[in-house]
Image (cartoon, rainbow, N blue to C red):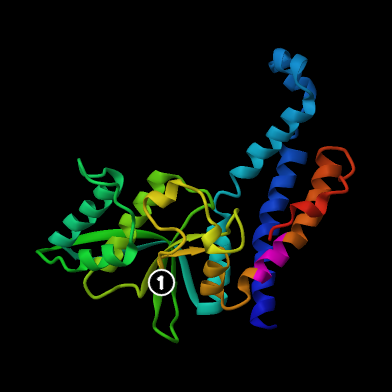
Amino acid sequence: MSNKDKVASAIRDVVGVMMDRVMHNVLIDDPFIKEKHRANKPLYAALVPDEIFKGSHFERRFVTPFGGVWEKLAKVVATEAHGECTMGHSITGNVGEERLRRIQEVLNRLEHAPKGENKVLPNWREELEYIKAGQGNAIPVTVICDIYVHNPTTGKSYSFELKGPLPNSDQTKVSKEKMFKLLAMESAPVDGAYYALPYNPYGSRKEDYQWSFPMRWFNMRVDPSVLIGNEFWDFIGGSGTYANFVHEVNYLGKEYRERIYRDFLGMEPPADTEDYLLK
């Protein structure tokens, strides 16, 4: 079996297992019972069709198990391509006291513009160069990476802060601080630290990205430390991985969307099902 086929199979396994768990939950373990809904919320039932609440019932049982799906997918893809990949990997190293001070200075300037000065815009290369120029007494620091990849053949290691495609500002700030600390450590425990989004909801190019909250901390369209969509998947899995990922998700999506319409909603799938393909 080729590496491409192995990755495709791994993607199907991860997504398929989760979707089967969701379907079993909403059809067997915890189905939507309209009589119970009407008894518990008679006002809602009198004003809004049952089908609306049936959909929200499914959504709540879908979102929770899929909370870590991106990390799980990244792990199976990176393991096939690089050999070793772990989630929630802890790295401890020493960082100079002045470097730690400069990390906080950079983050504070991005969050709060100095009085009388224009807003500071993020610039990864300049910020990292400024931080690394600091020295001082070594202080032990521990960072927990969302995803850590190590390739025994090349000896290269990489860390990734992997977030949903529309991350909030606070989690982005935390991620950037972790990345700075990793790259400021003595003896360089990683060859690269990246802020990664699994796909771009605004288009196929990095330049198309528009969600404002992470842009406070990164230049999302330019910073080399930011990987979005195909850049991320092809980095951890090799060229063509993102296209492979999209193909497998859409293949599975057709099957599960039809099952959800027929088995859960009790209706035939609409004719525009193909309009919802991941691109």
- Comparing 159 with 140, the one in front is 159
SS label for mark 1: strand
Where residue 31 appears, as percent x and y from the top left, is 75, 34
Q: What's the magenta region?
A: 243-249
Where residue 238 appears, as percent x and y from the top left, is 56, 78
- Comparing 125 with 141, the one in front is 125
> Which quadrant holds the C terminus?
bottom right
Q: Predominant secondary structure in magenta?
A: helix
Q: In this view, does 25 lie above or below 193?
A: above
Instruction: Find disc 1 in the rendering and name its residue.
Output: 158
Residue 1 quadrant: bottom right
Where residue 185 appears, as percent x and y from the top left, is 24, 68
Q: How crowded is mark 1: few (under 14 residues within 10 Å), some or many (20 or more)?
A: some
Q: In this view, does 186 lie above or below 51?
A: below
Residue shown at the point (82%, 48%) measured from the top left? 259
Q: Which residue lies furthest to the left in this view?
A: 137
| Count of numbered badges drawn on the protein | 1
Q: In this view, does 44 lie above or below 255?
A: above
* 85 on left or right of 205: left
The answer to whether one can see residue 30 in this image is no
The answer to whether one can see residue 197 in this image is yes
Residue shown at the point (88%, 48%) measured from the top left? 271
Check residue 234 for magenta coloring: no
Residue shown at the point (31%, 55%) measured from the top left? 177
Check residue 244 for magenta coloring: yes
Residue shown at the point (68%, 83%) measured from the top left? 2
Where residue 221 appears, as percent x and y from the top left, is 47, 61
* 132 on left or right of 6: left
- Comparing 258 with 9, the one in front is 258
- Comparing 144 with 115, the one in front is 115
Amino acid type, label 1: Tyr
